[in-house]
Image: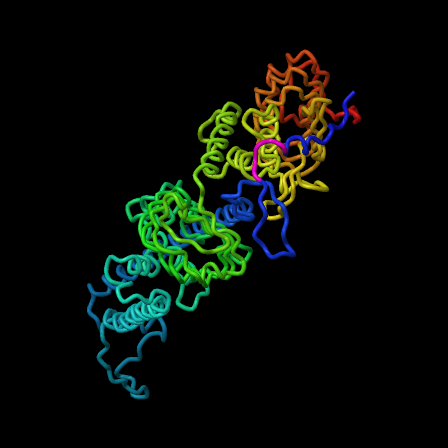
């Protein structure tokens, strides 16, 4: 008999980890169980997913517009060729004869000169058609050139109010490079009065000031001319889709996360123009110089991480006075001081605790890599990376690498992130959003999950809950799983062959889904399997099933009772 597991939260919280008191106003103080030296940006991954969807839609529109432009250009070329042909043909005849022909087409035959009742019109010399067209085209071209120059001048006047240094726009300096990119290369081609211009300029300035072409990113924020490709996903889209960046619903940048990405140089003070910025992490980079005093105008800033850099000097007093600031991490360890910090929110990164946390995270990664074996799984915000970040940093249970429940915890989190768990129709999300500071429950208490007396998952029932995406093969790591129901959801792809390792599986329901292919033979050979329901009905088969236990119509109500 299956039963709901007891709550092991109190026992697990005794394991290694650090309680710390959030530095917020007294009425908001709450105890949070997480490493004190680093907090992930709020809604970072959710907002990046939304931004990714918007970027893909804008990318499709950009391609469509390019195709339309190509068609219009081809049509214009055909018209031009036709005009040239007509004019060339006319030139081979006497001019007067050609004009007579054109006039007769419009007004009919010309009257005879012997007709006394008809007044004789005096012929006026008509200039060739070429010169007429030339006089019309020249003003249009001149007007376009003037408009282009005026746009460049207007944008430059706006940017001068942002970068006030005398040499900011000297040739080859970051300000000049960013300005040139905005007016010439940037596919958005913003106007001077566009509200997005300043944010776009500041983000471009960060790139050019800190050696962006050498950053360790999947896609460069601003590709070089040689590598520019208008069909790449980051072409012609807002900075909100750039790697390490997240925006709010109004497309204002609120997160910049560029830790250990190869940034070099002085921090541009213009970052202070990002008035909605809440989270800035440029730690573990070869930054030099001092922290700009202008950062004191970042009124929304909550987290500032500039540790493990080559910065020097003091943390500006104006930064310490920011009302929303919760933590500022710099290299102010008394044993090896580089930056002086007198803020109450200072985190000087004492080496011992940080090294312990890093060692723990490395050990967890070693365990996780035995489950998700593809090295690419941990790049670019994929579900495996999201699940690892959660169990190692955000999860309030803070399991150690040696915990027998770590593998199960990771796999359940992977199911959530792989199948868009934040959009499931549940009374309560398995994993609350990271800005709620909510404690995370053991997976045995998650909706649709049941465990045995040893707290191992034996049943997952998520039928008709809005699951989307490919089934993660890592589910095969739930070795005690008896009952799996993911039916009536638009899950895609094929049924993983790895499911054949679920030796205790008795019921598998994957019908009324969008799966294709066939039920693997390894599943059909499971000794305890009593029923496997897939869309293999002869009237509309999408999944082939050769198992003796196949159910091709509909599943019965044989779910285990807790």
Which residue is rendered at x = 66% and y = 34% of the image? 489
Q: Is residue 164 above or below residue 348?
A: below
The image quadrant of residue 132 is: bottom left
Q: Position of residue 196 (x, y in %)?
A: 45, 62
Which residue is rendered at x = 39% and y = 42% of the image? 260
The scheme the figure's colours follow is rainbow
Magenta region, residue range? 14-18
Q: Nearer the viewer, residue 264 or 124?
A: 264
Q: Nearer the viewer, residue 266 or 516?
A: 266
Q: Position of residue 529 (x, y in %)?
A: 70, 16
Q: Quadrant of the C terminus?
A: top right
Q: Nearer the viewer, residue 420 or 64?
A: 420
Q: Is residue 222 above or below residue 471?
A: below
Left or right placement of residue 231 versus residue 387 in this view: left
- Overall secondary structure of the magenta section: loop
Q: Is residue 519 above or below residue 417?
A: above
Which residue is rendered at x = 70% and y = 22% of the image? 454
Q: Position of residue 62 (x, y in %)?
A: 44, 51
Q: Quadrant of the N terminus?
A: top right
The image quadrant of residue 167 is: bottom left
Left or right placement of residue 88 versus residue 178 in this view: left
């Amino acid at each position: 008999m299956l039963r709901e597991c007891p709550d092991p939260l109190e026992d697990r919280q005794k394991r290694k980890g650090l309680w710390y008191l959030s530095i917020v106003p007294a009425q908001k103080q709450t105890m949070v169980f997480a490493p004190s030296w680093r907090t992930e940006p709020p809604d970072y991954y959710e907002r990046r997913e939304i931004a990714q969807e918007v970027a893909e839609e804008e990318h499709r529109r950009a391609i469509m517009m390019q195709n339309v432009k190509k068609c219009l250009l081809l049509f214009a070329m055909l018209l031009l060729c036709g005009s040239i042909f007509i004019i060339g043909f006319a030139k081979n005849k006497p001019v007067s004869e050609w004009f007579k022909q054109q006039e007769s087409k419009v007004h009919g035959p010309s009257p005879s000169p012997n007709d006394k009742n008809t007044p004789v019109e005096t012929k006026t010399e008509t200039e060739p058609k070429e010169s007429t067209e030339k006089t019309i085209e020249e003003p249009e071209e001149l007007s376009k050139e003037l408009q282009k120059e005026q746009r460049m001048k207007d944008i430059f006047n706006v940017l001068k109010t942002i970068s006030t240094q005398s040499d900011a726009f000297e040739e080859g300096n970051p300000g000049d490079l960013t300005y040139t990119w905005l007016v010439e290369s940037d596919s958005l081609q913003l106007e001077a009065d566009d509200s997005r211009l300043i944010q776009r300029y500041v983000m471009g300035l960060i790139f050019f000031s800190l050696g962006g072409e050498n950053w360790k990113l999947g896609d460069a924020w601003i590709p070089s001319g040689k590598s520019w490709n208008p069909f790449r996903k980051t072409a012609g889209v807002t900075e909100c889709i750039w790697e390490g960046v997240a925006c709010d619903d109004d497309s204002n940048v609120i997160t910049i996360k560029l830790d250990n990405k190869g940034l070099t140089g002085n921090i541009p003070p213009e970052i202070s123009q990002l008035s909605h910025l809440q989270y800035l992490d440029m730690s573990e980079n070869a930054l030099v110089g001092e922290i700009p005093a202008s950062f004191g105008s970042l009124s929304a800033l909550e987290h500032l991480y500039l540790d493990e850099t080559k910065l020097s000097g003091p943390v500006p007093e104006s930064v310490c006075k920011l009302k929303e600031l919760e933590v500022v991490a710099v290299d102010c360890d008394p044993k090896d001081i580089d930056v002086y910090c007198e803020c109450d929110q200072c985190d000087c990164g004492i080496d011992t605790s940080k090294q312990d946390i890093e060692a723990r995270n490395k050990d967890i990664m070693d365990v996780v890599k035995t489950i998700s074996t593809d090295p690419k799984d941990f790049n670019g915000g994929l579900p495996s990376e999201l699940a690892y970040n959660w169990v190692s940093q955000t999860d309030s249970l803070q399991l150690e690498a040696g915990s027998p429940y770590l593998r199960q915890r990771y796999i359940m989190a992977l199911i959530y992130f792989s199948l868009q768990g934040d959009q499931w129709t549940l009374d309560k999300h398995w994993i609350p959003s990271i800005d709620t500071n909510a404690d995370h429950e053991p997976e045995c208490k998650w909706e649709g999950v049941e465990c045995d007396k040893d707290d191992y998952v034996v049943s997952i029932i998520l039928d008709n809950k809005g699951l989307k995406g490919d089934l993660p093969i890592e589910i095969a790591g739930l070795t005690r799983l008896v009952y799996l129901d993911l039916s009536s959801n638009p899950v895609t792809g094929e049924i993983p062959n790895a499911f054949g390792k679920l030796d205790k599986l008795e019921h598998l329901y994957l019908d009324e889904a969008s799966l294709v292919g066939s039920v693997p033979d390894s599943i059909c050979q499971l000794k305890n399997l009593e029923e496997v329901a897939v869309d293999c009905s002869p009237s509309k088969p999408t999944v082939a099933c050769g198992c003796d236990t196949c159910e091709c119509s509909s599943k019965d109500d044989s779910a285990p009772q807790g």
